[in-house]
Image: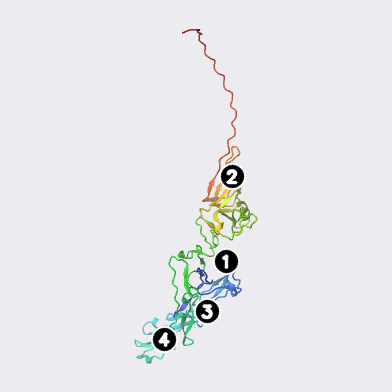
Amino acid sequence: MQQRVGNWVMTCVGLSLLLAGCASGGPSGRTPVRDGGPDSGADTGTPSCTVDSDCVDDGVFCNGGFICTDGSCVETPPPSCGDGVGCTRDECLTSTDECQNTPVDTSCPSGTTCFVGVGCQVAPPCEFDSDCGGDGVFCNGEEICLAASCTSPGTRDCDDANNCTIDECVEGDAACAHTPADFLNDALNCGPTGENDCVVCADPDPAQVNMAPACVTGACGLACQDGFADADSDPANGCECALGVMDDLPEMGFEDANCDGIDGDISVAIFVAPPPLGDDAADGSMATPVATVARGIELASTRTRKEIYVAMGTYAETVSLVDGVSIYGGYDAADGWSRARDNRSEIQGGETAVRGDGLFDDLEIQLMAITAANATTPGASSYGVRVTSSTATVTLTSDTIRSGNGGPGSAGASGSGGANGTAGGRGGNGCDGCS
């Protein structure tokens, strides 16, 4: 038997399940659907609803419902069932889909009795239990004479000795009701068969943030709370990723802030990878990247958010920067576009490998290796990155930039003629046969 009162029935509703092979919609089985199928809008980016009637819940009054908000089915709170009287037990009955307020005399000061809609009043005097004719309320149990006042225990025992049923006292019927639990999905009554083998699933550890108990096909597990996801697929640290984050810019912590599976935003970026995966005739999506950085910049320049994500590999090209188009390297196209410092995305360009001129909109070059060729023109220089005549801020983050050798110097001019030599000295006398 698992007796539930008030809003406790809603504890685990609306969770996104982590466990493999489990149904969507959370441990209570509440799955909002559109056109009779699962809510696909969460994954595809398309609205899951347009009006409230598109959202279909489990039909249980005590669980609340769903409304359509901004194209998504959003849970409404369960009924509170509060009557404003402090000494009544306020609960929502699963068996009859209604609120019930049961007076609890033990919540009142000594010598007073709880009355529905009124509160604590002076209790009728008594000497024996037989003097108490009952207060007309079935679900607060049989009245007895206690300390010369008629008092009810506050509850009626409706335990049927089966922990896979929800045991409730129904005042309107003056009877106990035993509703079979959704033992395959209910974290408060979770069991493999539903034959008196149900348990309350345990809470997660404190380190497992944004998680809650879940029941999946009759087995206890854990689930992400609504609005969160497990981006790193490691339940030990919980559901660290908040859904609905719009501005997931690539950064050197490589955090997947918007839960789309990569560092950055799949929906806005142009992807670049070396052939054969990359092809400049492609559309630049993650599945069909372009082959050159230059083509990626060209496609990104037409978008509102201008970003290209460059897979590791070598790109033999000279790159011209364009207003506002940022370049992010370090991706591994063969591993779901994961990102790491050791993934080398290298531009091998000409005497100026990356150049920008007349830039007005800020941009960033992040985690790129840039190598310029040696200058061949006499007196020329080699530049890894060169920006001229620009007011934009060009941010270089965790890049490796190498310039080549400068060009050889030009030949020097011919020297002027030397000065005349000085006159020779006077010769001495000759000597023939001298010793």
Residue 352: assigned label: 2
Amino acid at circle 2: Thr
Residue 20: assigned label: none
Amino acid at circle 4: Gly
Amino acid at circle 3: Phe
User: On the image, numbered disc 1 is attached to which residue?
Assistant: 43
Of marks 3 and 2, the one in the foreground = 2
Disc count in the image? 4
Viewer can see residue 306: no
What is the C-alpha distance between the residues marked 3 and 1?
A: 28 Å
Q: Which of the two labelled residues, at mark 4 and mark 3, occupies the earlier sequence position?
A: 3
User: On the image, numbered disc 4 is attached to which residue?
Assistant: 141
Q: Residue at x 59, y 66 (%)?
A: 44
**Looking at the rendering, which quadrant does residue 245 occupy?**
bottom right
Above or below, 428 relative to 89: above
Crowding at mark 4 (Cα within 10 Å: few <14, some 14-19, many 20+): some
User: On the image, numbered disc 3 is attached to which residue?
Assistant: 61
Q: Which of the two labelled residues, at mark 3 and mark 1, occupies the earlier sequence position?
A: 1
Q: Are discs 4 and 2 less than 8 Å apart at CB?
A: no
**Looking at the rendering, which quadrant does residue 71 occupy?**
bottom right
Q: Which of the two labelled residues, at mark 3 and mark 2, occupies the earlier sequence position?
A: 3
Amino acid at circle 1: Asp
